[in-house]
Amino acid sequence: MTEFISGLPNCALRNAWLTIGNFDGVHRGHQALIQSLNQRTAARSGQSVVLTFWPHTRIVLGYSSEPFLLTTLQEKNRQLQAAGADVVVTLTFNQSLADMPAEAFLEQVASAIQPVGLLVGPQFRIGKGRQADFAFVRNFYELRGIECESVPAFELKGQRVSSNRVRACLSEGRVDEAAELLGRPFSLEGEVRHGKHLGSKLGFPTANLTPEPMQMLPRFGVYATRVQLEGQTLVGVTSVGVRPTFESSSLPNVETLILDFDETIYDKIIRIEFVSFLRPEFRFDRVEDLIAQIDEDKTQTRRIFENGS
């Protein structure tokens, strides 16, 4: 069972091997890094420790004004646990931490956790202005008896797996490729809210989900999805977009028509897992044409899941 700690721990962790990063998405590269971390702790009956930050550093530093997060804090923690981390330490990232020199940050971490080793990826940098690269950190820590290693980039089909590569796939609607990089489908999770009941009026009631404000949405369009609801796995057709046929809202909506399901689920938590892109979002001149297209979306979705997706 993973232990979750908010802020630096008050006492040293046991024979800890440490890694540090944002870990947004907890993609297959992150998973491979944690697996390597566990291999190093196994011989000493130690603990693998993931030190991460929330909010994401890019938000505090002002690098991103558009939604870009692949995971909420809750989802990130869930996936770090699934990846096998023994301990997850989450530091509140604020301007004070952003301005901290690398030496001061590394000293604080070493004093609190007292790791026997540090394992990071090839793009690792730390400290104010990302001033400290792996060579700097290794020199700093090895003087204190902390072993330091860097693992090569994790590649899939000859290309490095990264959070930005996942984002690029999602922005183009390639949710199947994003799933390969993540090792699981990209998902959105939230409480089912009351909408304008436009789907119900057409005979297709939908579950409306409001994602976290900075969480990235896939390309606007319609997707075949799985719906996780209170231990049930259901099949859905999910529309992501601004409802151009009815209102062309300035804020995007995430609406899911759950197939073969007619329960009222307002205020319940659902998770939408994106499996396959069906079509782009577009405006219909006639409501009858929209209804016919929704029927076709349902047929395509059933076919996708019947074929084993």
Image (cartoon, rainbow, N blue to C red):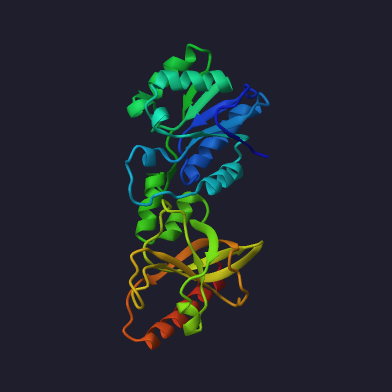
Residue lying at 37% horizontally and 62% vertically, measured from the top left: 219
Up/down of 240 relative to 79, above or below? below
Q: Nearer the viewer, residue 275 or 215?
A: 215
Residue lying at 34% horizontally and 60% vertically, measured from the top left: 172
Left-right relation of 60 to 33: left
Residue 124, x across and y down, in percent: 40, 31
Up/down of 291 relative to 81, above or below? below
Residue lying at 57% horizontally and 23% vertically, measured from the top left: 113
Q: Pick the quarter of the image with the N terminus.
A: top right
Residue lying at 32% horizontally and 28% vertically, measured from the top left: 129
Residue 297, x across and y down, in percent: 45, 77
Whether residue 115 is visible, yes or no, is: no
Residue 105, x across and y down, in percent: 45, 22
Q: Nearer the viewer, residue 11 or 94?
A: 94
Whether residue 258 is visible, yes or no, is: yes
Q: Nearer the viewer, residue 175 or 25?
A: 25
Q: Nearer the viewer, residue 212 or 177?
A: 212
Residue 216 image-quadrant placement: bottom left
- How many numbered callouts? 0
